[in-house]
Amino acid sequence: MLELELEEDINIRYIAAIDLGSNSFHLVVAKVVGNDIQIVSRHKHRVRLASGLDKHKNLDAASIQRGVDCLATFAERLSGFNIDDVRIVATHSLRTANNAHIFIQRAEQVLPFSIEIIPGTEEARLIFSGVTHTQEEMNQKLVIDIGGGSTEIIIGKQLQPLFLNSLHMGCVSVTERFFKDGDLTSYRFEKADGYIQQRLKDVKSQYKKMGWDSALGSSGTIKAIREVIIGLGHEDGVITIKRLKEIIDGLCQFGKISSIKLSKLAEDRIPVFAGGVAILYGVMKELKVEELHFSNGALREGIIYEMDDRLNRTDIRMRTTETLAQKHAVEVIHAEHVKHTAQSLLKQYLELASLKNKKELYQLLSWAALLHEVGLSINYQGYHRHSAYLLQHSYMPGFNSEQQQVIATLSRFHRKAIKMAERPDFYLYRNKDIEVLIRILRLAVVLNSQREDKNISAQLLLDEEKWTILLPEDIEYTALLSSDIESERQYWKKAGWSLGITLNK
């Protein structure tokens, strides 16, 4: 009774992370108690999305159905969870699939939480975070994670990744490429090794140059290899190149994937085991990793720890924004003024349209306002397009693929002609909301075009589809500003939008 009373006095929060991998889907549920995070349950289903990708990079109906069925099962465990307490990330197969939107539409019918497709670099960062948070403190470390469709290799220190890559090779894809007919021969493994060498040739020198004090492997493939090594009599479970070669020789003696019988190797891991072994052997050999130890932390643990308020993801994204702004010599004071005006206009719009719970729109607009001029570091001519390119292709820790695309899109359309046919479609955000953000950012940029050293606020009026801006009395209404505003009105008119400007006297 006393324990129950004490537990009731403590603020407890339950959070959950789902990792939609190329081979398996994972659900981790954790309890946040005070300063501690306690994992309370783990669930895994073998889905093998990667094996459902055809030559046109479309997921077949069967793989989509397997994934949806799995998520329907997860939904039962997550019944009653708040939206903010669940994060779902998708990795290589859904990054690659041209019809990922179909999977996501189907998934939303059984699971009422948003699915984020994350870039490979973000996947690597979260893996490193998961490993770091679940290990004793070490000096500089190398982390290797082999998934179904990609392999992440990271060097970092404490919580900070220093060099990371996501390579397009995984246990499913390599098995499909080199062992598709089920034959296991030394020739097949040599071909796979050559392929892996090619994948590593442009990055291996940087890894070896940076060095590491310890090497760790995470996720299912490396865990399975470790178990097999223990089954072969190496009780410490340490993975070495020599022991991997011992496994490869044993696989070749079996001759066929269907004939594999290895102590401690789970039956559902057998179909993709050869591909995973080939990758790890090639990576360790090329990077000259002497010993690899297994870590229980992985991508989903990284998500869980980042959901804790003490490691707020918004802070990570703001640091990313500030770093990019500094890197591209953005005039931060001007960008802050644009952000202030944009936030004020968005607040008014949401109130006038009777819309609530749009916190993410404020964040996206703020980040875009701070970064819309990064393209000036390339050239003034067409700098909005340069900004969009940089923001779409830069490494942006904390952002998923769609958030990065939204920020790039807002920057692309913050000035000049409004060619909405060039605007990409989104699945996490409504196209109407993105259009509103484009309008607001354009207005904020125009109202601050004189680059005055002060915050400018303007009143917004809505009359059906017509927007009217009441300019403040203290704005310096020069001939240049008048010309900029008139040009903007014409851009809106060509886009089918209506804009009125009035001096508030």
Image (cartoon, rainbow, N blue to C red):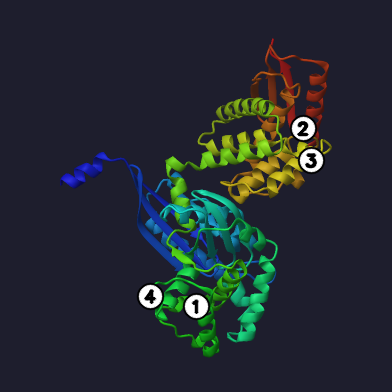
For label 4, count other residues whose C-alpha is less than 10 Å away and answer few (under 14), some (14-19) or many (20+): few
Quarter-wise, where is residue 484 in the image? top right
Image location (x, y in percent) of residue 294: 45, 65
- Mark 3 or 4: in front is 4
Which is more N-terminal, label 3 or label 1? 1
| Label placed on residue 243 | 1
CA gap, disc 2 to disc 3? 27 Å
Disc 2 marks which residue?
A: 492
Q: Disc number at residue 235? A: 4
Depth check, mark 4 against mark 2: the one in front is: 4
The crowd level at tag 1 (other Cα within 10 Å; few <14, some 14-19, many 20+) is: some
Earlier in the chain: of badge 3 and badge 4, it is 4
Mark found first going from the N terminus, 2 or 3: 3
Are discs 2 and 3 less than 8 Å apart at CB? no
Asked if marks 1 and 3 touch (Cβ < 8 Å), the reply is no
Residue name at image x 65 percent, y 44 percent = 406
Residue at 53% over, 36% down? 359
Q: Nearer the viewer, residue 464 or 254?
A: 254
Label ID, residue 168: none
Q: Say if mark 4 contacts mark 2, CB within 8 Å.
A: no
Kindly check if marks 2 and 1 are in contact, taking CB atoms under 8 A apart as contact: no
Please report the residue visible at 62 percent of the width from the left and 36 percent of the height from the top.
Answer: 322
